[in-house]
Image (cartoon, rainbow, N blue to C red):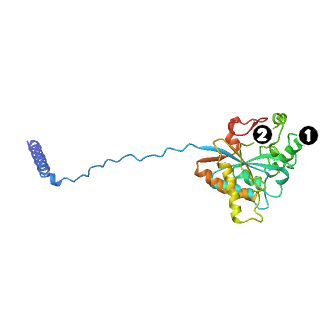
Amino acid sequence: MIAKKRIAKCATTCLLLISFALTLVGCYTEMDRPAYLPIPDVEPLATEEPKPTKRVALTFDDGPQHYKDQTKGIVDELEKYGYHATFFVVGDRVAGGDSVAYAIEKGNEIGIHGYTHEVYYDSCSEDDFRYELNMTEQEIRKQVPGYKINLMRPIGGKISADRVQTCPYSVIMWSVDSDDWNSSNRYYAGITDEECEIRVNRIVDNIMNSLKNGDIILMHDIYESTYDATKLLLKRLHEEGYDVVTVSELLGDNLKKGRIYYSETT
């Protein structure tokens, strides 16, 4: 009997609590409700489409140039943009500095130009041809033991068809000539600052006026004007959406020894 009374008392208490709660809900008027701000219509942020990457290979002949560290200076300028280039070196100019090792360390590529820069591969003897290649390769490997050399550029761009086919390297020419080798562009001695600027801009314009995706650019890292032109050129290439890569990166799997290349497509 006592248990039944306790159960009845609990039930009564629960009903009273529920009734009190409902009374509180009834007192919760519209004025008491928090004001929610409407969510404005927001247009999705426009995402910029990635620009298509245009790739070119920048190449330098006739170096390395140690006494003013122009080769190293060019490597440093390339590194600022995350770019890399290919340097076709002259064997008897490699010793006396560490420019070749420095260029390779920074992700650039080294190819063979010649040992003396006095032998043309379309008219020299076979012995001279092999000597020029082998001696240059030896000098490169003295600086960077075990470095694999895949590329060669003939002196003056002169090489016979037979020599191309028997060459143990890929033969690399160019599709864009900076004309920095022209005697009117090379050095600054005896000229005004204004003329220096004219020469630098002339070199850059020679490149940019005809440049297109897949080109191989010819320059020379031994000239004062080329060093300054390179700094301006890299800035222009970056602004116009170009990526600057090594020849091997540009040509990729198409690169074969005993073949000649002028650009990515020829």
Which picture quadrant has residue 134?
top right
Which picture quadrant has residue 148?
top right
Q: Position of residue 7 (x, y in %)?
A: 12, 43
Q: Residue at x 90, y 38 (%)?
A: 126
* Mark 1 vs 2, N-terminal side: 1
- The residue labelled by disc 1 is 125
| Residue 87 visible (yes or no) | yes
Q: Secondary structure at mark 1?
A: loop
Image quadrant where one finds the C terminus: top right
Q: Nearer the viewer, residue 110 or 57?
A: 57
Total numbered labels placed on residues in the image: 2
Are discs 1 and 2 less than 8 Å apart at CB? no
Q: Residues within 10 Å of mark 1 (few under 14, many from 20)?
A: few
Give the spatial CA distance, label 1 vs label 2. 18 Å
Q: Position of residue 31 (x, y in %)?
A: 15, 54
Instruction: Please determine whether, in this image, residue 97 is positioned above or below residue 133.
Output: below
Q: Position of residue 255 (x, y in %)?
A: 72, 37
Q: Nearer the viewer, residue 246 or 226?
A: 226
Image quadrant where one finds the N terminus: top left
Q: Is residue 2 left or right of residue 209?
A: left
Q: Residues within 10 Å of mark 2 (few under 14, many from 20)?
A: many
The amino acid type found where label 2 is placed reads Val
The amino acid type found where label 1 is placed reads Ser
Q: Secondary structure at mark 2?
A: strand
Instruction: Please determine whether, in this image, residue 207 is positioned above or below residue 197.
Output: above
Q: Is residue 140 left or right of residue 103?
A: right
| Residue 76 visible (yes or no) | no
- The residue labelled by disc 2 is 171
Q: Position of residue 29 (x, y in %)?
A: 14, 52
Q: Nearer the viewer, residue 128 or 191?
A: 191
